[in-house]
Amino acid sequence: MREDSRLVCAGRHPERFQGAVNTPVVRGSTLVSPNMAHWLDRKQRQGVDEFGVSTYGRFGTATHHALQEAIIEIGGGYRAQLYPSGLAAISSVLTALVSAGDHILLTDSGYHWTSEFINNTLGRFGVQVTRYDPRLGANIAEFIQPNTKVVFVESPGSETFEIQDIPAIAAAAHAQGAYVVMDNTWGTPLYFKAFEHGVDVSVQAATKYIVGHSDAMLGIASCNEQTWGAVSKTSQSLGQTCSPDDAFLALRGLRTMGVRLRQHWVSGLQIAQWLEARPEVEKVLHPALPSHPGHALWKRDFLGACGLFAIALKPVPEHALHAFIDNLEMFGLGVSWGGYESLALPFVPAGRTSTQWPYAGPGVRIHIGLEDTADLIADLERGFSAMAKSMRTASVEDTPVQASA
Ligand SMILES: *Cc1c(COP(=O)(O)O)cnc(C)c1O
């Protein structure tokens, strides 16, 4: 079956639900058995990790199991665990794989809260971390210590968009007995086949493109066989679960993710190209542009691009940057991404130790949604005009927005 067909069919069993096309929301904490034999059989099958067997709501109902089945069929791996958010997936997986005295290598481009969790929580339990330049590739070997248990990758980083050489990093990590955990939210299970490139655990903030409609929080960790035991046991001990309503929304989102992502890709690239020609823009950071330093790696390993990228503006006073953002009518100002709507968010990368934001001006992260791109371009033109007008009325006290702000 090809991918678009798989997206439609994966994890669906209408015959079990009176013919309902979508697996219904099955709510349940207590899941009763008709007799002792049934109960003991269920407990035994759950004990040997049989798929889709549950004795309690915390271990999932048919809705959760349908999503777990679908995600493995689409993105690969052995089994998947669900979480109430993408960050809960990341923190639980890391807790599962490291112990006191162990060491984590974390890409400097990683999601901010991943680094917060490692420093502030795992740090209290004696876990060490070293941040590394995401562009290292096979040279990551020089940073791997005897106690390195996890090499955490995120490609591309969701602010600065460096593409990592995941197969080279995975080869080096595995040679030293370390696992590779990937935040694959940008690539999604469709555009980056994590397990084919040596990843051991692939995490999705399903909040983004899988749910796809900005209306639910959800995390998924897909594991290979070597990591599943630890990840599932630790996640169960931590009491990780998610609402069946949110699992249902993720399943619904999955069915249209192929067509949605194709449009995010085409529209995003069109806007990125338009921005590349704008005089206000210093650099467009989009891996699918030939001008991107990671373009060759993106072409080699990825099957597409989502709608998220960034621009570095030329230096501007703060009020001009605010005028740009405040005069955008179609772009929402907010975090998260992956919904059907466009967003624009100024940022300055924070907390980095091995890479630097090399531009004099601030970054603006852009998510291109499913609106007509002509309307989005007109909106950006409106923002740039307001920015220019604001610059003309600038006073000498204006402080430029520094990259170190
Ligand atoms: C949003 C995001 C997360 C966290 O997901 P939540 O569901 O918001 O907890 C993790 N990684 C990346 C790259 C993200 O964009």
Image (cartoon, rainbow, N blue to C red):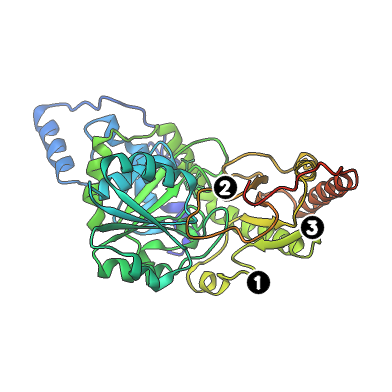
**CA distance for labels 3 and 1:** 17 Å
User: Tag 2: residue type?
Assistant: Gly
Can you tell me whether the CB of the residue at mark 2 lies under 8 Å from the nearest atom of ligand 1? yes
Q: Which residue is mark 2?
A: 338
Q: How far is mark 2 from mark 3, CA to CA?
A: 26 Å
Q: Nearer the viewer, residue 5 or 390?
A: 390
Query: Crowding at label 1, few (<14), some or many (≥20) Cα neighbours within 10 Å?
Result: some
Q: Residues within 10 Å of mark 3 (few under 14, many from 20)?
A: some
- Residue labelled with disc 1: 291
Spatial CA distance of label 2 from label 1 is 24 Å
Name which residue lies at 29% across and 47% down. Answer: 127
Determine whether, in the image, residue 139 is placed left or right of residue 324: left
- Residue carrying label 3: 280
The quarter of the picture where residue 288 lies is bottom right
Label 2, residues with CA under 10 Å away: few <14, some 14-19, many ≥20: many
Residue 13 in view (yes/no): no
